[in-house]
Image (cartoon, rainbow, N blue to C red):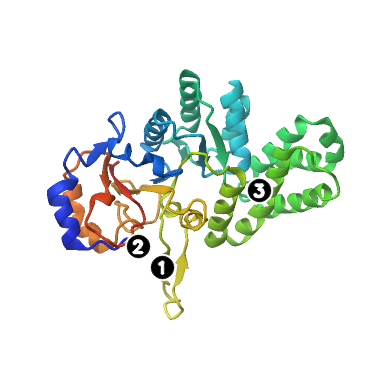
Amino acid sequence: MVKLILSSFLLFLSLSVFSQEDTISFNRENPPFLDSTIADFDVFLTAEVHWGENNSSRKKKMIEYLSSNNSLDVIVVERSYAFGLWVNYFLESGDSLFLKEFLAVDDFFSTVNGVVYDDEYEFYSWLRNFKIENNLSIQVIGIDMASFWFGKPILWSFLKFTDRNQDMQELLATSIENANILLLKEKLTTRAILKWYRKLKLTTSQIEIVDQQFSNYLFNLQQSVKWSKERNIDYRENEIAANFTNYIAEGQKVYGQFGMGHTMLQPEKLIRSKPFTAFKSRTFMSFAYLLNQDEYYKDKILSIGLVCFNCDRFNDFPGPDLFYPFLTYEDFERLKSEFLKLSPNTLIDLRKTNEKSKHNCQLLLIDFE
């Protein structure tokens, strides 16, 4: 949890933060106060509230800025490994069929109750055009778990992998047949998809897999079983951090926009709720924090936190404004009136403050939905 010392931070607010020199809107060309330090970081993370209408526009601005400074090779996404493959196929070939079909069975980050809030296909279409216009070689990598409780994307990806390989069609004929049957079911249970996967795992353990992408897809399924069964957030963060180091070479410049809890740079103590208050509280460590413990990535991660007003439409948070884990409730209440004076999408450089304690982010974005 960010612990801001009120006196120094209020001094910062009153004297310097809101000057044009120290803040900048994403609506402008770029955040120039990063120019002098951008070379110090390899990983750039921004926080989002899922299904926010401004999510794509923020990503576009960061991608434009980082690319203009030769600081972007890879975009990591809060998606499965397979999703990144289908996006890259579209980015490289222009053939949108696979990506459209995937999003038809998994539009989790785009649509809520039939309403499109954050159009993923539009974003990746923009990214492809941006790459071509600027002669860039950016690739997208999914580093999150696959969701067995949303089984159709898993089955769909499996069938596309095997469609392109005649040898696998013969070796995995039973798994292919069962995947086609399951894919047609109107209701697909987690139990059914896990049962299918166990049989697939047994079969693939007895054959040689030469397709590295398919092998990575199978590994992503394997690591996702525990997450799907237990929903253990600590396990998930550890696996995301491991996937990052497995799939991304040291020295590559990386950008990603993730849910707020994934991007904080410090451990967060989670207080037990009733009736478990007598038990010891536990500490949550995000993948950004875990990655920052890596010898290579230590102090090479720039995190942009988020304070969002009137943006909690779909979650169960106590109130419409989101600021946790980047501010305490007390700090938010004290600073709220100052934040409300800001223009939408204003970035505050917390490194400019006199505050000496460690923060969950170096920059803070103030947003209004």
Look at mark 1 in the image and give the residue it sits on.
269
Q: Measured from the top left, where is residue 273 in percent x and y?
A: 41, 71
- Looking at marks 3 and 1 on the same chain, the residue that comes earlier in the sequence is marked by 3
Look at mark 3 in the image and give the residue it sits on.
220
CA distance for labels 3 and 2: 31 Å
Residue at 40% across, 40% down: 39
Relative to 47, is 237 on the left or the right?
A: right
Asked if residue 184 can be seen in this view, the reply is no
Neighbour tally class for label 2: few under 14, some 14-19, many 20 plus, Cα within 10 Å: some
**Whether residue 278 is situated above or below residue 291 in the rendered picture:** below
Q: Measured from the top left, where is residue 291 in percent x and y?
A: 50, 54
Label at residue 1? 2
Q: Amino acid at mark 2?
A: Met
Q: Amino acid at mark 1?
A: Lys
Give yes or no for contact between labels 1 and 2 (Cβ–Cβ under 8 Å). Answer: yes
Asked if residue 228 can be seen in this view, the reply is yes
Residue at 52% across, 55% down: 295
Relative to 34, is 106 on the left or the right?
A: right
CA distance for labels 3 and 1: 29 Å
Question: Quarter holding the C terminus?
Answer: top left
Q: Secondary structure at mark 2?
A: loop
